[in-house]
Amino acid sequence: MKATGIDTPEPRWLTMSQGERGRALIARALMPDLPLLLLDEPSTGLDVAAREQMIRTVAILPDVIEGPTTVTVTHHFEELLPTTTHAALVRAGRLLAAGPVDDVLSSELVTEAFDHPIEVGRRGGRWYAVAR
């Protein structure tokens, strides 16, 4: 195994779990101290426990470091951080609604966005969406 200059082996990306890779990518994104963190479907491939760990990690970032503003793209409402303040709904490449999260994530607007009856709400501070 090749060494990195100190007596520790190189990290092996191919042997890391999806959750470990996700955390590594978030850490790498935060290294330059940027004011914006973009997360595109951040829990794809994660099991429930790893998804919750990722959500908790991103949720506490403002308590640990200054900033960043986080933008998350997701189809799964349970992935939204409890601190989410604004949302946008996109349908067929066009903006359907945008604004304060409580105004945008309504059952009526989400049903229109997905063209399927969907009940939207919050439980324990977390969002959920259920097909009717």
Image: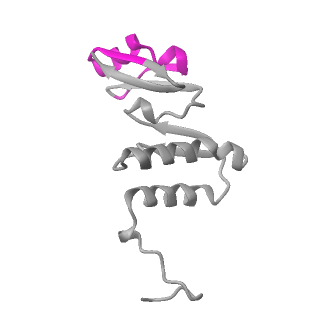
The figure's colour scheme reads one colour
Quarter containing the C terminus: top left
Q: Is residue 116 magenta?
A: yes
Give residue 43's position: percent from left, percent from top: 41, 45
Left or right of 26? Residue 61 is right
Q: Residue at x 39, y 13 (%)?
A: 107
Q: Is residue 84 above or below residue 70?
A: above
Quarter containing the N terminus: bottom left
Q: Residue at x 52, y 14 (%)?
A: 103
Give residue 110's position: percent from left, percent from top: 38, 18
* 40 and 94: which is toward the camera: 40
| Magenta stretch, residue numbers | 93-120
Q: Can residue 121 be seen? A: yes
Give residue 37's position: percent from left, percent from top: 57, 46
Q: Residue at x 54, y 34 (%)?
A: 81
Determine the image quadrant of residue 8.
Answer: bottom right
Q: Residue furthest right?
A: 66
Q: Is residue 130 magenta?
A: no
Give residue 84's position: percent from left, percent from top: 57, 30
